[in-house]
Image (spheres, rainbow, N blue to C red):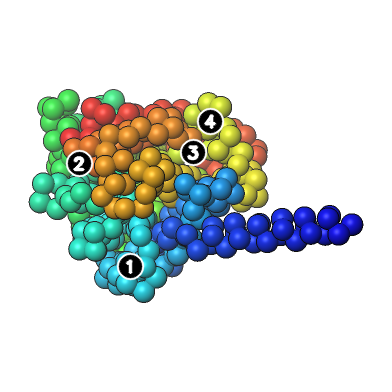
Amino acid sequence: MRIIVRLAVVTALATAGTSAAFAQNEIKVGALYPTSGACIIFGKPALQGHEIMVEKINAAGGLNGRKIVSIHRDSKCNPKDATAAARDLVAKEQVQFLIGGVSSAEGQAISEVAKQEKVVYIAAIPKTTQMTDAKNFHKYVFRAAANTNTEGKSAAVIADRLGMNKICTILMDYSYGHDLGAAFKAHLAKIRPQAKIVDQAWPTQGTTDYTAYITKIMQADCDGVFGGVWGSLFVAFAKQAKTFGLFDKVKYVSAGEIGSPEVAEELGNDMPSGVWGNAYEVFYFPDTAEHKAYVAELSKLTGKPHPQSWPITGYMAMQWLAEGVRKAKSTNADAVVAALEGMTIQTPIGPQTMRASDHQANRGQFWGPMNPSGDPKYPFKVMKPVEYIPADALMD
């Protein structure tokens, strides 16, 4: 009996020692996602995906035997708030890595802090090419998201397929919208030279009344519209545009992930049929073992039979960071940078490679026309049919 008790005490002490060492040797990650304001529709599920991956890694023993501690700050979809939050995470919380962001303006702000503090930043969602162009690129910034070239050019591919010749655009008046428009216009000129941009509308970020912009488009005699009004902003825009009959008059192709279940569910019957949208991931496609496993995992953890698409952004950004640290066998920023450059990882939507030249993942997007699902379990519109447009030929 004494031997058994003694062994139990020794085992308990050893376990306690291991747990203590695991806790003391933590890897701190600063997560910056907007969980308030207009961007909450994307920021909250992205943070959820991030946390799922962190929990998954820790349950498997951590990274190189070290526990990940994730510390979240609400970036509020605002570059000033994102900057303050990133500085707080580095200075006060002593995080070793930064991850997240939704808007391009946020991403640029966080990237600048990462550059100054020499910490690796994985941009989960921000797309503007300005973040990784020759002027602003630095070795500590990596993008797990698609960029505006990929998104704008793939939208041009759809516009060409739909036979759009007289095109109006409605894009947000900041870096994301301007970069998106430039990529769309340049690629359209290449693949459909007869098409012309006949009118452009530039609502500011946060606009809630789109009446003047919709009226302007209706009067421009367009046969197609390329839009970049996204998230909850598209919800307001679509409801207003529907009353004017805009979607009945023109073919509409929209960037900004309006094809995601988050937006489709929020709009319900107000989501116009036939409008082309895109998404980072949808629970009903692709039909692969890896993706099915991810969807099942997400459904179980969230309790939703048809989970949102934006958790994949936080999930994969954290996966990139984890694989970089694992390969480097270190949290040293320069070692993780070297590990990430040129790396290929297996994700729920297939293999992804991080280019060494500009730290851009070859992340494509899912596109399709919004139509009724035909399944009573999903009482909202889905991209039907849906296709994946790869990024490799469109990123530059």
Q: Residue at x 17, y 32 (%)?
A: 187
Q: Which image quarter is the N terminus in?
A: bottom right
Q: Is residue 209 above or below residue 252?
A: below
Q: Earlier in the sequence, mark 1 or mark 3?
A: 1
Classify 10 Å Cα crowding around label 3: few (below 14), some (14-19), many (20 and above).
many
Q: Earlier in the sequence, mark 3 or mark 4?
A: 3
Q: Secondary structure beneath disc 2? A: loop
Name the mark on residue 90.
Answer: 1
Examine the rendering and report whether any part of residue 372 can be seen. Answer: no
Q: CA distance from mark 2 to mark 4?
A: 28 Å
Relative to 214, is 69 on the left or the right?
right
Q: Which residue is mark 3?
A: 282
Classify 10 Å Cα crowding around label 1: few (below 14), some (14-19), many (20 and above).
many
Q: CA distance from mark 1 to mark 2?
A: 24 Å
Residue type for callout 4: Glu
From the top left corner, tell me how far across and down residue 179 is, in percent. Answer: 18, 47
